[in-house]
């Protein structure tokens, strides 16, 4: 029995070391590839794999903390070092501490909160500030079971594509000639530098807006300020009145590309979202500035 236990220990340690080396290799490969003008499919897939490895690490941390009968601190869920450094001052501010107490109290009360803890900062973990090329703003995470995955507008494979995302796909087809996907997973966008950022990063199940005005808005507004003030030539896609109001947070607006149109929801897509050509315009701008275009096909 003792020998079996020791074998299991060394086997697990070996797998952990192997996984760490694989993640480091992925990081190096993605870093090298992004100097090119156009990402290939293989390069995008490597970037997705790196993103998923970060999610896995955060999930392991959450499970470890909860196994001890506690709940993780929100800062612990942010795995991307550059975002940790850029947003460091936010973590000690009263609004953020209050937000953390609220979210932890929801977890302790066994309330069903979306997305899962390890996906709360998925958009940021997928896309370091220096790699952001496009920002797409959303509001709340999806609040039905199985939908929210930490990326605005995106849902996991196997989940019905929401109406707004179906309309986004329709515009992509009309604008860029892309085929209509059968799924709603936008991980490939995130891996290429598309920051799919919701204003509020958690929600209680079946209760839209239940975590609004708790502090998330102040935090994500700082994310927008950070991207726009420290970097140049970012495309901001502002869909709908709510997102366009957040446009006031964009610093150095003359150094970025800001595109506006109605929201892609079923209620407003026909008022100007269809025909906006934001995806081809975004790529034209990025290429003009010497950046690789986004492969929008998912």
Image: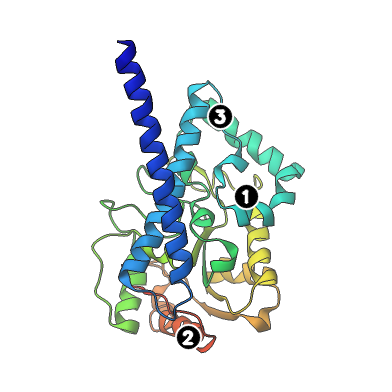
Question: What is the residue that sits farthest to the top in this orientation?
Answer: 1
User: Could you tell me residue 7's position as x and y percent?
Assistant: 32, 22
Q: Quadrant of residue 83?
A: bottom right
What residue is shown with label 3? 71
**Image depth: mark 2 or mark 3 in front:** 2
Q: Against 127, is 275 above or below? A: below
- The CA distance from mark 1 to mark 3 is 18 Å
Say which residue appears at 40% left-offset and 32% top-offset.
13
Label 3 crowd (10 A; few <14 / some 14-19 / many >=20): some
Query: If the image is split into quadrants, where does the N terminus sit?
Result: top left
**Callout 3 secondary element:** loop
Whichever of labels 2 and 3 marks the residue nearer the N terminus, that label is 3
Residue 154 visible, this orientation: no
Q: Earlier in the sequence, mark 2 or mark 1?
A: 1
Q: Relative to 233, does residue 71 appear above or below in the rendering? A: above
Determine which quarter of the picture holds residue 232: bottom right
- Label 1 Cα crowd, 10 Å radius (few <14 / some 14-19 / many 20+): many
The residue sitting at 68% across, 57% down in the picture is 86
Check whether the beta carbons of the residues at disc 2 and disc 1 lie within 8 A of each other. no
Q: Which residue is mark 2?
A: 287
Q: Closer to the camera, 205 or 50?
A: 50
Location of mark 1 (residue): 216
- In the image: residue 41, left or right of residue 57: left
Q: For the residue labelled by badge 2, is the local secondary structure a helix, a strand or a loop?
A: helix
Q: Residue at x 37, y 66 (%)?
A: 44
């Amino acid at each position: 029995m003792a020998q079996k236990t020791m074998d299991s220990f060394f086997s697990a340690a070996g797998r952990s070391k192997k996984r760490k080396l694989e993640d480091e290799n992925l990081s190096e490969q993605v870093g090298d590839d992004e100097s090119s003008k156009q990402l290939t499919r293989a390069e995008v897939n490597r970037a997705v794999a790196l993103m998923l490895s970060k999610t896995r690490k955060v999930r392991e941390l959450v499970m470890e903390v909860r196994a001890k009968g506690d709940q993780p601190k929100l800062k612990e869920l942010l795995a991307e070092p550059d975002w940790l450094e850029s947003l460091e001052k936010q973590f000690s501010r009263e609004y953020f501490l209050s937000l953390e107490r609220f979210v932890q109290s929801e977890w302790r009360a066994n309330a069903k909160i979306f997305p899962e803890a390890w996906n709360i900062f998925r958009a940021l973990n997928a896309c370091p500030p220096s790699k952001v090329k496009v920002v797409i703003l959303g509001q709340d995470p999806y609040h039905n079971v199985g939908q929210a995955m930490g990326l605005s507008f995106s849902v996991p494979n196997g989940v019905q594509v929401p109406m707004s995302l179906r309309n986004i796909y329709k515009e992509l087809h009309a604008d860029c000639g892309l085929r209509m996907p059968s799924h709603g997973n936008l991980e490939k966008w995130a891996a290429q530098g598309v920051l799919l950022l919701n204003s509020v990063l958690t929600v209680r199940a079946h209760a839209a807006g239940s975590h609004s005005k708790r502090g998330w808005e102040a935090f994500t507004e700082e994310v927008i300020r950070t991207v726009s003030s420290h970097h140049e030539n970012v495309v901001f896609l502002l869909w709908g009145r709510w997102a366009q109001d957040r446009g006031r947070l964009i610093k150095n607006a003359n150094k970025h590309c800001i595109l506006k149109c109605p929201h892609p929801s079923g209620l407003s897509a026909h008022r100007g979202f269809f025909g906006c050509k934001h995806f081809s315009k975004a790529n034209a701008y990025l290429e003009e500035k010497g950046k690789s275009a986004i492969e929008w096909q998912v």
